Image (tube, rainbow, N blue to C red):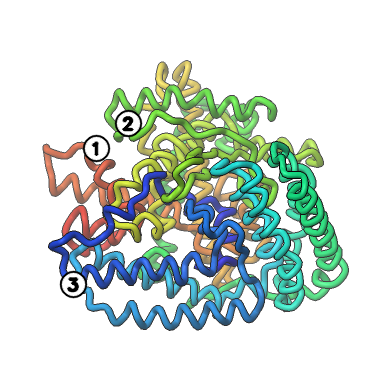
Amino acid sequence: MHKLIRAFLILMAVLAVIASPNSMRARLAPNSDASEKQAVWDKLADEYFDQIYFKFAPSAGTSAGLHQYDPLLEDYSRAGVDTEIAALHAFEKRVEAVNPAGLGEALAADRELVLSNIRGALLTLETIRPWEKNPDTYSGGISNSVYVIMIRKFSSPDDRLRSVVSREEKMPAVFAAARANLKNPPRIYTEIALEQLPGIISFFQNDVPAAFAGATDPALKAEFAKSNAAVIAGLQSYADWLKSDLLSRSNGDFRIGADTFSKKLLYDEMVDTPLDRLLEIGWANLRKNQAEFNRVAKELEPAKAPADVLAELAAMHPAPDKLLQSFRDTFDGLIAFIQTKHIITIPSDVRPTLQETPPFMRATTFASMDTPGPFEKVATEAYFNVTLPGPHDTPEEIEGRMASFNIGTIVSTSTHEAYPGHYIQFLWVNRAPTKVRMLLGASSNAEGWAHYCEQMMLDEGYGQPGTGAKDARESKFIRLGQLQDALLRNARFIVGIEMHRGKMTFDQAAEFFVKEGYQSKQVGLVETKRGTADPTYLYYTLGKLEILKLREDVMKKEGSAFSLEQFHNNFMKQGFPPIKIVRQAMLGNNSPTL
């Protein structure tokens, strides 16, 4: 996938759940009895990652644990974009030429995954064109390219700093490419870039030097001081240019249109359901969750309107400086419940590290999981990022942000990001059948799984007195928090479709999150900003509904032999491909996913 796409997607933290630290290359080599077709495919798949996927996104190579890419930086120039487009088209023809007959079920599915990945990248580069429309692509992208070297100690400080310097020395060309490429971006994109830039500048001024304080080579440290100062100056100049020049001519349209939206869903999620039918499904689930929220709220406070109970829930949050610890405190109970109730096998006792969200991700996310790549052998830590209030936030902004971290949503967010959500899926992906399945997947699987877990865990009994709640009243508030998070995802589902096919304005979308999604105004604004550049963020609810239907169909097939733990384990073993592929593997048919 193109570096510009990846630079944005990493902010969503949607596809971070991709791998295990164990190398799979040995077991992926064709066995002695493998057919010639399978051997040809294995070679072609390797070439895709070597010649396309990581070649044009070396920062993604670093994330995957392939450290030969560490000194390299993405080519953001128009020539670089055109070169990648040509390479993708050429490789698409090579993959299309492979006959899936004789590959076997797993490899035939891999072929479809690679084709979809190529077509999704081409759709983004040729039609959506973030390299031409989104200023944050450049400043956020270079921040990520340093962050992935900085965050994990896979080699000595000097070795990693040497790679940082190598990348930083190439960054002036990135700012030049931005000025040359950006043409009439949507105003909201330029505003988001400006909102993020102070944090990014601070990141290079403070966080990056602190991360390499242990470097010992004086000459290298001098080189870093020079390259880092140049990046800071370049970012400051870029911010000035955005304000004084680009902002005034940022009159473009962020909407991608119904046709492109449908194609993006098809390529990214293998979903071909018409948009009108998807809206019917989305609205039905929204109304179902609203009704359940109102029912539980009435049980809690019979004399109050649901909106007033929601306000009460929003106020039930820890102080900002206690937030990270509040998340840590949920892990013991979640892990014990999973093991006692046989929810899913947990492959490792190692827990993720809680930390503040990196500055270049703050504007568009409240929490995310950052896991190491499949080829990382040394620095195998996983990071649970939480966005704390910023030093310049007003009291109203702080309260609006903290409302999203109430006692209920802390439980659902911990479930979503860690146990048994993204982190557990990350621990399982090394059991996926192929290398392709470890590296390529779908947000409707990764985010759908995590969102499914929020509801599933409470349905199985977590959050009752003695298992996550001190009494029945707190238990109901925990359920309200889960439902509020579900309504947030319901709102994304509808807003994404309606905004991008021109039937909902930005302001109407922000209000929709408040009125129909039961969110604070601050959350509604952040979520709408995200939706302008992440149009198909309906994949949370979409994936959850697909998994619920899959579970129901497997239960019908297996009857009394059905085991929830075995269902979850078998789901995990597939990697994180579109649910269509998982259904084929678990049910043996291509029945509808919804």
Q: CA distance from mark 1 to mark 3?
A: 38 Å
Disc 1 secondary structure class: helix
Disc 3 secondary structure class: helix
Q: Amino acid at mark 1?
A: Leu
Q: Amino acid at mark 2?
A: Glu
Residue 36 has which mark? 3
Specify few, some or many for label 1: CA neighbours under 10 Å numbering under 14, 14-19, or 20 or more: some
Residue 94's image quarter? bottom left
Evaluate whether residue 332 shows in this view: yes
Residue 39's image quarter? bottom left
Specify few, some or many for label 3: CA neighbours under 10 Å numbering under 14, 14-19, or 20 or more: few
Nearer mark to the viewer, of 1 and 3: 3
The answer to the question of whether label 1 and label 2 lie on touching residues, with beta carbons closer than 8 A, is yes
Evaluate whether residue 367 shows in this view: no
Q: Residue at x 61, y 35 (%)?
A: 355
User: Is 342 above or below relative to 25?
Assistant: above
Residue 577 x/y as whole percent: 34, 58
Mark 1 vs 3, N-terminal side: 3
**Camera-nearest residue between 108 and 72:** 72
Q: Is residue 84 left or right of residue 578?
A: right
User: Is 461 above or below relative to 379?
Assistant: above
Residue 249 x/y as whole percent: 80, 75
For mark 2, what is the residue?
460
Q: CA distance from mark 1 to mark 2?
A: 10 Å
Mark 3 vs 2, N-terminal side: 3
For mark 1, what is the residue?
564
Nearer mark to the viewer, of 1 and 2: 1
The answer to the question of whether label 1 and label 3 lie on touching residues, with beta carbons closer than 8 A, is no
Disc 2 secondary structure class: loop
